[in-house]
Amino acid sequence: MYERAYRTWFNIQELALSDTELLTDCLARLHDAFPKHPHFPENLKVDNSFVNSVLVKGKSTWIATQDPDHLPPFQHEVIFPVGWDKPTPLILTSDLRRVTTTLPDIFDGEQNHIPILIQAWAYILSARWAELIDAAQLSESHGCRESRHPTSNGPQAAAGDASSIIVHIGEVEEDAAHWWNTILHKEGGWDATIRSYKGDILYSPWSMKLVSDQLFVISAKFKTTSSPSKHKPANSTTAYRYLSKYCHLHGIEAQKQAALAAALLIPVAKWDRRPIKMTIPNLLSHERDIREGISIDSPPKSNKLLLDRLLTLSCNPRGVKSLLASIFFEPGVTSNICGIWLQGSLAFLDTAKDPKILLRTLVKRDPELGALWLGAFITGAHYQTLQRVRGARLDIDLAAAAWTETSMSFIQAPVLVSALEGREKISRADEARLLYLCHDIDHSIPPLFPFEPFGFTALEDTNLDVHEHALCGKDHYLGYVGFAWACQGGKMVEQGMHDPPATTIRAKYGQFIDYGVDINIDYEDIDSEDDRSEMVTLNIFTWLREQDGFPIAERAIREHEWLADLRDDDNSPVQGDVRSTVGGDNNVGGWILKTSTQRSNSI
């Protein structure tokens, strides 16, 4: 398994390095990304009952079989944080030792505008948020309002000021110049806020606090000298137009999309309670030196539906983190060897000393999620994602997986009914799937980890529900039906209802491996103890057996040395014949189990 993982990622990296259009294609996909993702409707019900957050909610609906009378549909609540207790610090520094971000190599040789563009996108997303969320508001700070110069015409900066970064925005209306001055203001020129039930000020998911070694100064030529709009913040459509003109002036459409990808990851930084640290942009000092950068096809003019989908996805940082981690899930890798799979994967990825090569490799694994990984590297979110993967802590969000057609957990696969015909056993993976689909109170949430349990269970040893549905002859699968938002007045607003239900799961790159290629596999850091597999197997067997107890046939698992804590707690002898098979490595780990009466042959 270690070699399989190592070769899998070797193969992916070879494909990534030969795909010269990989990252630009990922950015182009943002123009119509995730068409099945729900978006915030009007009149959302806002829950501001917490001191440090404001939430909106909805429910995803799922089916287990085509016949609702056979197994009823079920729902899961999804919570979106839309108000946070503080802005995210955006630290711009010339000290490369403090920087935690990586700029994609497609921008090598270009002027780096992304630290500027991410602030523009943060405003646009926040402005749209204020248009959608009841009681949210967008405002300018007093200091920024006082700093405008409505009668000025020409560059608003003194040339040669070494402590300033001159940002050329071309020939624009004075309102546009004021907007750029607002978003780049040293003390924060705007606020997007909402209040908690106590009246405390909370901030939009994309609110940032700029901390920079140098100041930004806007250089502009005004088209007119008419008075600008008085103290009225630009709405999302107007702000998008200002941003688009800037990017067209500088020929940086690809950087514009990359900055959007990064802005979508700002709530993840909030979730992780960390700042975003980027290098100070090194821009051209004279407007006449502006040259074209990498370009991609321009999207339609303000596509609000697309923006709303991305905004809603971004408001689910747990879902975004689960999508990032999903590239490390491999169907068929069982819980007792998943740690070896992850060790082999990371052993190869650690050989990529250039973070830009690492980015390309991770993007190639699932290019549909590539923009999120690109945003993760720009904002530094990739560090914690990879750290959690090292501990086998792969987050799961089945709603986010369905909305993006992402393979994230073994629980998404259909039950293999045809494989059960004429047999007296069921795989523990299918046993777990049926337990979840039957959805009794003890199995109403999916397993915490994505990797399936190993081995088989005798049908006579299974839970009564599993036994019934394993033999009923019907197809069983996890099908996504749709989503309904909780809105004001008790209304539920449905979006994306699927008939038939959605079951499409996108395959990942790297599942076909050429073992004939001679590569040097590094086994030096392999951990023979494999505590990751122990932890995951512990969890899945707790999920499987905590309610009904172990069947007698699983005495080999029950008496494994990893179950020492359980044996100390319950010293009763194990009796009976072995019918179920352990399968694979018997690494299970220790935990305390309860027993119940749904299975007759239990211990």
Image (tube, grey):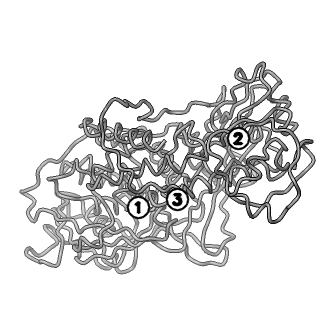
The CA distance from mark 3 to mark 1 is: 13 Å
Whether the residues at callouts 3 and 2 have beta carbons within 8 Å, the answer is no
Instruction: Determine crowd level at label 1: few under 14, some 14-19, many 20+ residues with C-alpha closer than 10 A.
Output: few
Q: Element under label 2? A: loop
Label 2 belongs to which residue? 582
Q: Which mark is residue 383?
A: 1
User: Of discs 3 and 2, which sits in the foreground?
Assistant: 2
Under mark 2, the amino acid is Val
Task: Tell me the residue that label 3 is attached to.
Answer: 391
Q: Position of residue 544 (x, y in %)?
A: 76, 47
Q: Earlier in the sequence, mark 1 or mark 2?
A: 1
Q: Is residue 59 left or right of residue 120?
A: right
- Quote the CA–CA distance across marks 1 and 2: 36 Å
The CA span between labels 3 and 2 is: 25 Å
How crowded pointer 2 is (Cα within 10 Å; few <14, some 14-19, many 20+) is rated as some
User: Residue visible at 8% across and 73% down?
Assistant: 159
Residue at point 28% right, 50% down?
244
- Closer to us: mark 1 or mark 2? 2
**In the rendered structure, which amino acid carries the disc numbered 1?**
Tyr
